[in-house]
Image (tube, rainbow, N blue to C red):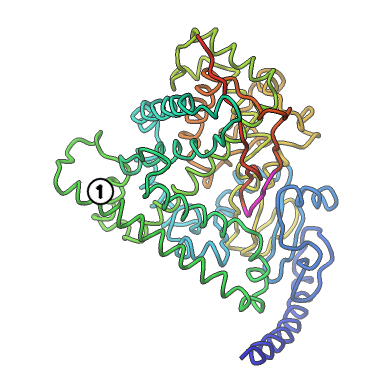
Amino acid sequence: MDLLLLEKTLLALFVAVVLAITISKLRGKRFKLPPGPMTVPVFGNWLQVGDDLNHRNLTELAKKFGDIFLLRMGQRNLVVVSSPDLAKEVLHTQGVEFGSRTRNVVFDIFTGKGQDMVFTVYGEHWRKMRRIMTVPFFTNKVVQQYRYGWESEAASVVEDVKKNPESSTTGIVLRRRLQLLMYNNMYRIMFDRRFDSEDDPLFVKLKALNGERSRLAQSFEYNYGDFIPILRPFLRGYLKICKEVKERRLKLFKDFFVEERKKLASTKSTDHEGLKCAIDHILDAQQKGEINEDNVLYIVENINVAAIETTLWSIEWGIAELVNHPQIQRKLRNELDTVLGPGAQVTEPDIQKLPYLQAVVKETLRLRMAIPLLVPHMNLNDAKLGGYDIPAESKILVNAWWLANNPANWKKPEEFRPERFLEEESKVEANGNDFRYLPFGVGRRSCPGIILALPILGITIGRLVQNFELLPPPGQSKIDTAEKGGQFSLHILKHSTIVLKPRSF
């Protein structure tokens, strides 16, 4: 059987070489392609570049080949843009042309080949899904309705940390408790549910499955089979695991959350719109025939990953930077005490009165961007960009991390310095008003979760700094902030142990 597979693979390789050479010659006559490294048949640049296409590796290639360059990764064209002007072209000026999404063999599994909102192609289905998700998730009304819950969850974190004797001595892995906070913040909105503790069996199961999904999807390990179809047979085991995790997750979402909400809705009056949670609105859309049951489950899948994990990473980065920069932590604490009064806990409306807290959040999102390459874009048809021809169905990556960390655009970008957003960059906001700074993207395919993420970050970081002195573990001067990059993500490699010494007011 293995010999037969090898024989077929070698035959396919020969055919692919011939086709690749032929297509390359034909395209060379028609297209003025962006610069990039020399390619070889079939493999393109894969043998030179490898699977690890993280933001820092792509930055090094941009320094060599320019603000727009092309990588041919097997059968895929990968175009990387690294300047504010080109980012504006992709995300805004030609937002329709580059408004679609490219997927890969693993994301096709986890999203049912684009039945969700985040990874679907640009068109009627995306518009419908975005509209259905906006009202229950991404409006100021939702923020005002749920901000009391976010404040309550932050207060519970403070209370739990104070009860744990290790927190003020040897330290704790704060991320574990913050993970429960983020699940409760989003599950309140989604299902009007929360988990009582980190030991809740359903929470443990949900967290494990979502973690496995993130690990499998974010890994660069499967790129070779995604880029080069003739190598795809070697991914069979990997893809089988992905399918099993996907099926278990969707079953969990359906059995324990969606169906439970349906039963509850059938026994209670839902006449009062204000009492509806997000899934009620989404199930209404299903009843009207606008979406099907699979779409409902893939919306839940998107929120579990895109809303919970990314915000959690940003909170973790923010806390780590404050631990490693005690003078910034003191300055933030002083602002909170001065503006609100000692002991008065920060609330969502207070954030507008706290410019240094806002600057700390902005600087965290700049230096430690959770989605450093944004979610990839794609042009369905041949297009032009930066004076070059971009073949149809090219994968377009905007290196948003480099836009926000390029010393040509920012003063000492390697430093964690919130003051920059009060001084020379005081007019720059996270909403994409400046194309050097796009933590949530901008335009049609921007992340709508910005309206939830910013207040949650402000409340959570603010409450922790108000109530504790955040320190590295005994014997350490700093905590490790080495990065772990994935297909889209950027998070801390090792979850940090932090000492939290309660303050007395």
492 magenta-colored: no
Asked whether residue 74 is in view, the answer is yes
Asked whether residue 135 is in view, the answer is no
Relative vertical location of residue 352 with respect to residue 69 in this rendering, above or below: above
Q: Residues within 10 Å of mark 1 (few under 14, many from 20)?
A: some
Q: Which residues are magenta?
A: 483-487
- Residue at 80% x, 52% y is 61
Q: Amino acid at mark 1?
A: Arg
Relative vertical location of residue 368 with respect to residue 418 in this rendering, above or below: below
Magenta: main secondary structure equals strand
- Of the 4 image quadrants, the one containing the N terminus is bottom right
Which residue in the structure is indicated by mark 1?
261
Give the camera-side residue of 260 and 387: 260
- Residue at 55% x, 64% y is 106
Residue 107: horizontal and vertical position, in percent? Answer: 53, 61
Residue 36: horizontal and vertical position, in percent? Answer: 81, 59
